[in-house]
Image: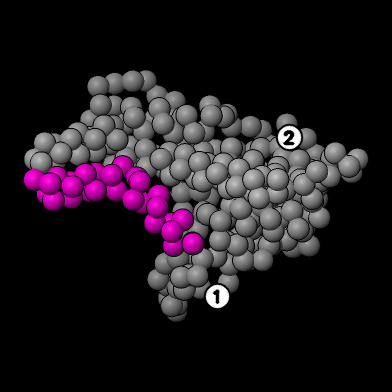
């Protein structure tokens, strides 16, 4: 199932659709489909397209100030900001990727004393070559930035957002429907990339947590439109692909929610 969840977004990404269309053109001997696939790839690679789509999945969120956030029981930072590289004496080590803002956002909230506890999720997929989780490594990075060790918790290993939400809910003893039963739900400040926040927030709230979002790692920048925004660019294709993947993830989450509802009926 994990492999399917990882492979499906690749097949339905702009590049995946381009390759499938080109392959169909060869099999069906339809040269026009090749031109169609190239036109599709061009459109998906335009900065204008990437900006519009990534801005849409970010739902026009804005950067917030840590000291303006309400107090909560915990700051929760989601994994997905580290990569594994060759190292000396090695053999491997972790370093930050593009989403380092997630940890920085969590540290900002802790420095602003918005919560007494920092929860890091233990992201780890079966093909990881390191035995520890990303959360274990992030805990050391947070301590290096001044967060007290006793204030940091790491979830057990998790492979996706749904498992992250379940692990955090278990740690905070949240249950769906607790508010309806009169018990106040645990309140968290959720830190993740802006494009990922709507889906993550929904999954955490579905498990009985009260979520105040603290989006970071914005991909949509504020720029003036120029004719260059109509020319292909690699980073624009990355934004378009990211938006496709996130929309697909939201669709799958919605279908799973409907299936759970039908199963409980």
Residue 136 in the image: state x and y as whole percent. 62, 66
Q: Which residue is drawn at the image coordinates 73% and 61% (left, top)?
A: 153
Q: Residue at label 2?
A: 69
- Residue range of the region highlighted in magenta in the rendering: 1-29
Question: What mark, if any, has residue 251 been given in the picture?
Answer: none
Count of marks overlaid on the render:
2
Residue 17 in the image: state x and y as whole percent. 28, 44
Q: Which residue is drawn at the image coordinates 51% and 73% (left, top)?
A: 130
- Tell me which numbered mark, 2 or 1, is placed earlier along the sequence: 2
Left or right, 175 with respect to 58, comes to: right
| Dot 2 alpha-carbon crowd within 10 angstroms: few under 14, some 14 to 19, many 20 or more | some
Q: Residue at label 1?
A: 131
- In the depicted structure, whether residue 254 falls above or below residue 162: above
Tell me the element at label 1: loop
Distance in Å between CA atoms under marks 2 and 1: 35 Å
The one of 210 and 119 positioned closer to us in this rendering: 210
Nearer to us: label 2 or label 1:
1
Q: Which residue is drawn at the image coordinates 49% and 61% (left, top)?
A: 2
Whether residue 103 is visible: no
Q: Quadrant of residue 206?
A: top right
Left or right, 217 with respect to 177, comes to: left
Tell me the element at label 2: loop
Residue 3 in the image: state x and y as whole percent. 44, 62
């Amino acid at each position: 199932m994990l492999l399917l969840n990882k492979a499906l977004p690749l097949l339905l990404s702009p590049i995946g659709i381009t390759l499938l269309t080109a392959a169909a053109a060869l099999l069906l001997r339809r040269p026009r489909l090749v031109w169609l696939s190239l036109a599709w790839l061009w459109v998906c690679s335009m900065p204008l397209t990437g900006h519009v789509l990534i801005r849409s999945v970010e739902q026009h969120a804005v950067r917030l100030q840590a000291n303006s956030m309400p107090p909560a029981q915990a700051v929760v930072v989601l994994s997905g900001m580290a990569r594994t590289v060759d190292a000396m004496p090695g053999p491997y080590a972790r370093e930050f990727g593009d989403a380092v803002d997630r940890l920085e956002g969590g540290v900002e909230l802790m420095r602003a004393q918005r919560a007494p506890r920092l929860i890091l999720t233990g992201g780890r997929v079966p093909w990881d070559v390191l035995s520890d989780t990303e959360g274990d490594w992030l805990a050391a990075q947070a301590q290096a930035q001044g967060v007290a060790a006793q204030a940091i918790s790491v979830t057990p290993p998790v492979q996706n957002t749904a498992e992250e939400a379940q692990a955090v809910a278990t740690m905070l003893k949240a249950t769906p429907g607790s508010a309806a039963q009169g018990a106040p739900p645990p309140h968290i400040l959720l830190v993740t990339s802006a494009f990922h926040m709507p889906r993550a927030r929904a999954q955490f709230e579905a498990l009985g947590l009260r979520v105040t979002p603290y989006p970071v790692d914005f991909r949509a920048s504020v720029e003036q439109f120029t004719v260059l925004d109509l020319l292909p660019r690699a980073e624009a294709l990355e934004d378009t692909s990211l938006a496709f993947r996130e929309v697909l993830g939201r669709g799958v989450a919605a279908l799973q929610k409907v299936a759970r509802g039908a199963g409980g009926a």
